[in-house]
Amino acid sequence: MASIRKDPRGKSPYWYACFTLPDGRRTQRSTGTKDRGQARRIADQMEDATHVAREGRMTETAARRVAADIYQIVNKDKLPASSIRSYFERWLERKAIENVASTHTRYSITINQVLDYLGDLADKDISYFDSKVITEIRDRMAKEKSPATANHTVKTLRAALNQARRDGLVDQNEASKVTLIKHRSNKRMAFKIEEIQHLLEVADDEWRGIIIAGLYTGQRLGDIATLTWANINLQTKQIHLVTRKQGRSTSIPIAEPLFNHLEHLPAGDDPNAPLFPNAYRTVTTQQGRSSTLSGQFHRIMESAGLVPKRTWKSTGKGRDKKRQFSPLSFHSLRHTATTLFKEAGVAHAVVQDIIGHDSEAVSRVYTHVGDQAKSDAIRKLPQIKLS
């Protein structure tokens, strides 16, 4: 028969339930409550559970029912049951409100891939989603896709399970126990000046402007593609924008080569008109994703002889083989800008304020650099001429 008692050592304020385990051993467990009546009912529930287990009827459903009854006794509310699938679906709904469309799309793709890998396990309680399962998913993603994709998956799961921990659905973030894969060979390279010249020679006029903007601002492809004339002040030679990834507001002086290009673009009377209409249309019709533009830029690099032609083909459901990492991409212009600034002796804080940083926390540190310091830094960059 179940009974309750206080901690004889006086280390816990909660009542303890004393009951007999299915194998006949006597044990005690904390009820997690200071209320004697609640503790009495919880002890009875634990005792009843052992009777069920002794008779061989302790199924997963029965165990959850016992846990739900105890939870309701203490909290005066029902236990928020959550399968892995239902939790991630709710998490994605929350992220659709909190994040920009492109970020939500990336999250959705990652979570759907995880659920596909899980199969029937996705309909189990979220407590089954432990570090061992997450490690298996990471390793499978690394093998079938790439180490970068595997690491992105782990980071996404860390964010999702951190919210589950705050919501009280799990006691700890199991994804935080899973390490990222080190892949030093998958490192982005910076462009050489002569390589940028080759890109400009084979690119059309719009892409020449995008490439020059990427070099002299260090911004990401999606941010450049969605620039409008409202972001540009040709009188003060400034670009004002809010980055899509971090929501960081920044002002960047316009370098002379970029200024010369912008002066020759048809501005019109609409301040919301895009600087690069084709690129803007591509991004805005694809829920903020710039993957199509990345593919276009890769073909420009192919034409310039900087990278080999891709061998994989689209199957309509993804690629027909694992994607090969390319050390050169549009993001390499970001590395190029950083390298050129450092070679010119520009202070690290100034570089960070212009280009930003992949870490939002680090970006927030560099918020007090004056316009003059940034203008001086921009003038130190090599002046590439557009033909």
Image (cartoon, helix red, strand yellow):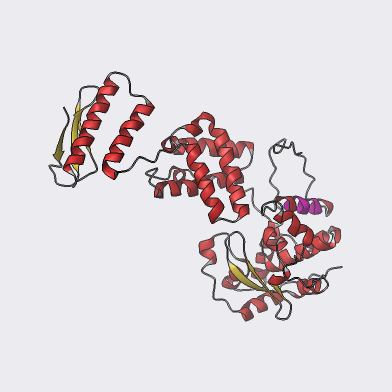
Quadrant for the C terminus, please. bottom right
Image vertical order of residue 195 relative to residue 61, above or below: below
| x and y percentages locating residue 20 in the rendered image | 20, 26
**Drawn side of residue 340 relative to residue 347, left or right:** right
Quadrant for the N terminus, please. top left
Q: Work out whether residue 231 or residue 217 is closer to the camera in this orientation and state it.
A: 231
| x and y percentages locating residue 11 in the rendered image | 17, 47
Residue sitting farthest toward the left = 8
Residue sitting farthest toward the top = 55
Residue 82 in view of the camera: yes
| x and y percentages locating residue 83 in the rendered image | 46, 36
**Drawn side of residue 137 relative to residue 344, left or right:** left
Task: Please give the name of the residue rendered at 81% of the width and 54% of the height, measured from the top-left corner.
Answer: 300
Q: How many marks?
A: 0
| x and y percentages locating residue 76 in the rendered image | 29, 44
Task: Please give the name of the residue rendered at 60% of the width and 46% of the height, measured from the top-left corner.
Answer: 148
Q: Work out whether residue 10 or residue 57 is closer to the camera in this orientation and state it.
A: 57
**Drawn side of residue 211 relative to residue 123, left or right:** right
Q: Main secondary structure of the magenta part?
A: helix
Q: Choose top left, top right, bottom left or bottom right for residue 366.
A: bottom right
Q: Which residues are magenta?
A: 294-301
Q: Choose top left, top right, bottom left or bottom right for residue 139.
A: top right
Task: Please give the name of the residue rendered at 75% of the width and 39% of the height, measured from the top-left corner.
Answer: 314
Residue 182 in view of the camera: no
Any magenta on residue 168? no
